Image (cartoon, coloured by chain):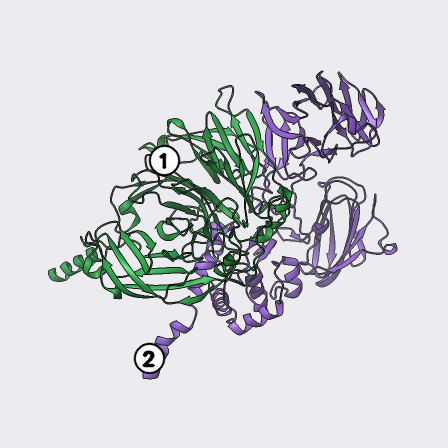
Chain colours: A purple, B green
Amino acid sequence: MRFLLFLLSALPILAQDGGQLFTQYCSACHAVDGKGATGGQFPPLAGSEWPLGNPDRAIKIVLMGFNGPVDVNGKTYNLEMPPQGAALKDDQIAAILTHVRSSWGNKASAVSAEQVKKVRAELGDRNQPWKAEELLKLHPLENVKVPIEKLISHFYKASFSALPDFSQLKPNTVEEEPTGLIDYSAYANTDGFAMMWEGEITTVEGSHEFSLDSDDCSRLIIDGKMVCEITTNGPAGRTVKKSETLSAGVHKIRVEYVENVGQEALKVGIKAKGDKKIKWLSKETGSGRGKPWPEMMLAPTADRTVIYRNFIEGTTPRGIGFGFPGGVNIAYSGDNLTAELLWTGEFIDAGHHWTDRGTGNEPPAGEEVVRLSKQMAYAFTADCASAWTVSKDAPPRFRGYQLDAKGNPTFAVEISGGRILDSYTAATSPGLSLIRKIKTAGKMTRPVSLLIQAEAEAKQQTPAGFESGPLKVAVEGATFRYAGNAVILDLKDKEVLIRYTWN
Amino acid sequence: MKRFFHTLLLISSAAAAPQLSDYYTRQEIPLPPGEVMEIGSIALLPAQKIAVATRRGDVWICDGAYGDDLTKVTWKKFASGQHEPFGMFWKDGWMWMTQRPEVSRVKDTDGDGTADTFETICDDWGISGDYHEYAFGTDPDKEGNIWVTLCLTGSAGAGADWRGWCMRVTPEGKMIPTCSGIRSPGGIGFNAEGDTFYCDNQGLWNGSSSLKWLKPGSFQGNPTGNVYAKLANLDAPPEPKSGSRIETERAKFPNFIPPAVVMPHGKVGQSPAGLVADTTGGKFGPWLKQLYIAEQCHSQVQRICLEKVNGIYQGAVFHFLEGFESGLIPIRLDAGGIMFTGGSNRGWGSRGSKPFNFERVKWTGKTPFEMLTLFATKDGFEVTFTEPVDAAAAADVANYSMAAWTYIYQSGYGSPEVDQATPKIVSATVSPDKLKVRLKVDGRVKGHVHHLQLKNIKSASGDEMWHPEGYYTLNEIPGS
């Protein structure tokens, strides 16, 4: 009896209270009920396979933190969990994980301080947070059957305009894909590559409808037989469907893919006869554009522009996007002081930056994206006689912008003791065009030049204009000067008008 | 039966612990329907209007937030397309804001209620495109300068110019590098005397979150951004030793200013954000010139009293207001005594379960029985109470306990509490007016957080103490 009393009084002092520690350190994001705080904005631990099974996986996450996209209970989260290894002791981490593994319906073994200590020692000097792929390679989820088993990806870096004969190619990289999903996202936003995946799917007996969609070409092969293919370059939305009768059991699957230029997409699905929903074999799924965030497409109104100041793919971090009524869009660089990107159609999907922490760049949502330049757009005329050359002394300063009654911007740049006022409006007739007016204010101490284009090839060069991809560029009130790959406008006191017209 | 009932009543009235609603009224201010209002900045405008800026980059102006009937609140969108402003104020007809890429000022020149002129004042710091490179800015200081803290890249690196520094931006747009050693700020502002402070969050080189004093020329503890000193030919900031203690390292580097008040991680908060000084002259309670800290993760407001000892700021943090609806970021206090706060928990969780909130707090006029201040003395601490104390209980040393600890000062993320000590309270002397008690304490540790807990100490009129504990950071010992 005395012994028991001693035990009862001693235990609470010796043992860490996992539930209390969880509430204190973890519940702000994972919620006291383990379902993820704020209606599931944060990953749940209840019902998740991640904290179950081999405890090393969860111990490693708690010690080093976790970063980037992760799929939990069928939903993708893209957040950052700070590492707790330097703040929490081994016995505290053990108590927290024991609580997590035995609460809310979770049933897994207790975690001991010794296990935490061992993992901590193994990790040594590592101080980087984990990414899902890295951790899943070390510790695959035990009880989750992935869509494609034994999945291997092959990556080929080259320019392809059609599906190649893969047997003649040597892959640059070959990787195991523990997520079991067709996923090219490691190479997203690059042009010119091909990929090929091979693995195994398990099916019931009967008819199965396969679906395939891609930007650009793709092919789906089951048990060595071509089922669906898309053989021309083009955007997503060209879904091909075909039904195949399969026996019960394991079947070989092979997917081939080519990205030519521009945006990417690849969706592969299978639906057994009688099933209501497609089972996706690809990371991208049928809804939206396959992005892990909800789409929040920004659009101008009929008579006013829309502004998006954020990280826009293809320009610098000080990007300022303007979507004009009618479907003309620009991304002005507050660093390089010109509209570096022009495109047509949809403006931009803000869902990327307005969900979770908003990591990364978002590309323009529309079509015919033209990148005009990617360097400082102002130079002293004396420095750039034969090629575009920016002097480091007396750099120009961005001075902001003014909006007219319809939200059309005039950007102001201070240089050489004066100001350049750079206005943009859009027109829809006769065709889509962007009208840019440039004028100087104040007295410039040294003549200044503006870089009009240096990225794409300027064809049909004349003093009055040139052509660049889908764009025809014409100047009024001045002439263009061509130096190397640069199209240059030497600024005088007179207002200049530049018209960008889409063919 | 009757006696039993009686006893019950007695127990329940005696056990009624002080609660927030006795002293403060917290109310949600209705937001424009259908809008996502993740509030990152609040500015007080003339004619009792209030502007808020959201993380999505919208600026809205609210009318009616001071009124008795909050259903009459109206909103008008003033601007959109700004880049995550954290710091906004109104001056001479312009809305000034510190946003991620720049300090700017915005104006409605044609009087239609919507901004049309967006002037870039200063964009001389670098941004790399990393989401964590937040910029937090102040109101103008006595010289008219805006103080801007520049969060590290990913909160751990310095991938663009001047990350990890505090800059001053003059009204003309000149940028003056002012302090090094910043990690991940959550807010910045002034104390009642006009000195600048910011909250830095637990992480690399920060064992716990804390309130830090931005003394010009100082190093704040995280050396990651030190490389940028050369951009302005400044002296190299300290390169401290990882695994040491702040107390040890600051002895080597005189310009290493220690955290003024450590807010012990988990115990007081997890993400301190905006701060504001009480210059209302008593319209928000008796906390004259104290600081209020908005806490994002715990959805609370903490209270801090500061003193300067041997030229270094230090002081105590107390629990104060709680139960806010989302993660608090900015905080404002109107001269008439209304506190406005709000925030968001997108990307960082909070106890308040709504995705965003805008709230106001008013003092009911009833003073809670609390420790008004906790200050260090030559041989211990002095507590000042908000009301006369029950002198017999306050003179009994058995009614006090103290624990002290510090954190490892290291390049790793956070720290456990270490070097625990148990200072002994050897005497407690109540002042004749019963408003103060002097505690003689043996075994204090310079540099440690000192956690003072009171028990069984009521006011002379029998009120229980609302929050019978405080955490004092003893950077310096008076008279030493």
Specify the quadrant that holds the C terminus of chain B: bottom left
Q: Nearer the viewer, residue B33 or B10?
A: B10
Q: Which chain is indicated by disc 1?
A: B
Task: Rate crowding at label 1 as few (under 14), some (14 to 19) or many (20 or more) other CA atoms within 10 Å.
Answer: some
In the rendered image of this protein, does residue A113 appear above or below residue A212? below
- Residue at left 83%, top 48%? A158
Q: Which mark is residue B334?
A: 1
In screen coordinates, is B405 left or right of A425? Answer: left
Task: Rate crowding at label 2 as few (under 14), some (14 to 19) or many (20 or more) other CA atoms within 10 Å.
Answer: few
Most extreme residue toward the left is B2
Q: Which percent across, then down, holds residue B174?
A: 57, 34
- Quarter assignment of residue A440: top right
- Give the residue number, with chain letter if any, for mark 2: A5
Residue at disc 2, secondary structure: helix
In the rendered image of this protein, does residue A135 appear above or below residue A332? below
Most extreme residue toward the front is B480
- Residue B24 at least partly seen: yes
Q: Which percent across, then down, holds residue B164?
A: 57, 47
Amino acid at the residue labelled 1: Asp
